[in-house]
Image: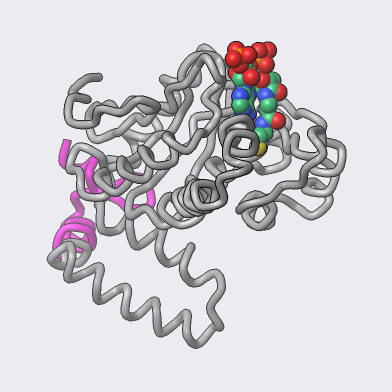
Amino acid sequence: MGDSERYDYETLLVEFDDGVCLLTLNRPEKRNAMNPTLGEEITDALERLRNEDRCRVLVITGAGESFCAGMDLKEFFIELQDKPAEYDRAHRVAVEWRGRTLRLFPKPTIAMVNGHCFGGAFTIVEGCDLAVAAEDAKMGLSEINFKMFPGGSVGKSMGNLLRPRDYMLYSLTGRPMTGQIAADIGLVNYAIPRDKLRDDVMALAREIADKDPSALQATREIYRNSMDMEWDVAMDYASSLQSQHTARQANAFREEGIGDFLDKKYKPGLGGHENAKK
Ligand code: COA
């Protein structure tokens, strides 16, 4: 991995490898808690990575033993308590980058949950398309433990992922769960031993990075955007998206995707077109 010169941040590391961007929350001494600086910096990074050719898939992880300990409780709630304008800005930035910028990012995203993941960090997991955890990662909706509730975008976004009983159990008790339990309840896709996590996630990211970028973008968009639409509106949207997609990829799905299948070059049911070229 290398070439992070152009992405020089205090709280983040940005690296590229073979079409995959690894974005690391880099405050290990604070268990990668999200302070206002991190909010500003990751907003900037995501804005640039949208159009970065070296980033076909984005992986988010944490430096050291933690994924992310949630909001920086000191910098947000103590140091800004008498600074309403600064708090308002930091709060809006924090909610926006996870709730919209990340969720609507035009490329596939994977949360690599390498350790502690609490409170506000759950919205990073929810904002990413996929999530893989270390089996022994400690994760939790811990707000109730410090006399708070899952505020900001946490309560709302958990409704997209968790079954009601699981949300209630973990948010009312604040009980930590392991990465394995997070997988069992569908909060992450699967959990694996910590020492295999990075290789597994990078292989997953590369597998996806090999697919057609426009098809990947549309695959995310049709799912995310039509969720809240009425049926007829969603069908209309799907037609428009198909036109956009085929224009964006210059009709590659007909010419190469279907064309090469009909020419007996590969079988899409058994693997991607990209593998047929190798
Ligand atoms: N906000 C601000 N600082 C935090 C933090 C957070 N969410 N989580 C950890 N830190 C800081 C600690 O205050 C400590 O700082 P210090 O060295 O200046 O004293 C440092 O990170 C290390 O934390 P520590 O508790 O000693 O590490 P640990 O490995 O023993 O425990 C946690 C890690 C994550 C279990 C524990 O820090 C914790 O419970 N944090 C709060 C998690 C939480 O409820 N987050 C939800 C916020 S929405």
- On the image, the x and y values in percent for residue 26 come to 43, 22
Tell me which residue sits at (25%, 58%) in the image.
214
User: Split into 4 quadrants, where in the image is the N terminus?
Assistant: top left
Residue reaching furthest to the bottom: 232
Residue reaching furthest to the front: 82
Residue 110 lies left or right of residue 240; in this view the side is: right
User: Split into 4 quadrants, where in the image is the C terminus?
Assistant: top left
- On the image, the x and y values in percent for residue 124 come to 53, 42
Residue 223 lies left or right of residue 122; in this view the side is: left
Query: Is residue 110 inside the magenta stretch?
Result: no
Quick check: 167 above or below 220?
above
Viewer-nearest residue: 252 or 262: 252
Tell me which residue sits at (39%, 76%) in the image.
238
Tell me which residue sits at (25%, 52%) in the image.
213
- On the image, the x and y values in percent for residue 109 come to 41, 43
Is residue 127 something one can see in this rendering? no
Instruction: Kindly indicate the quadrant of the structure image that contains residue 215.
Output: bottom left
Residue 164 lies left or right of residue 207; in this view the side is: right
Instruction: Kindly indicate the quadrant of the structure image that contains residue 253.
Output: bottom left
Tell me which residue sits at (17%, 62%) in the image.
249
Range of residues picked out in magenta: 255-278
Query: Is residue 263 inside the magenta stretch?
Result: yes
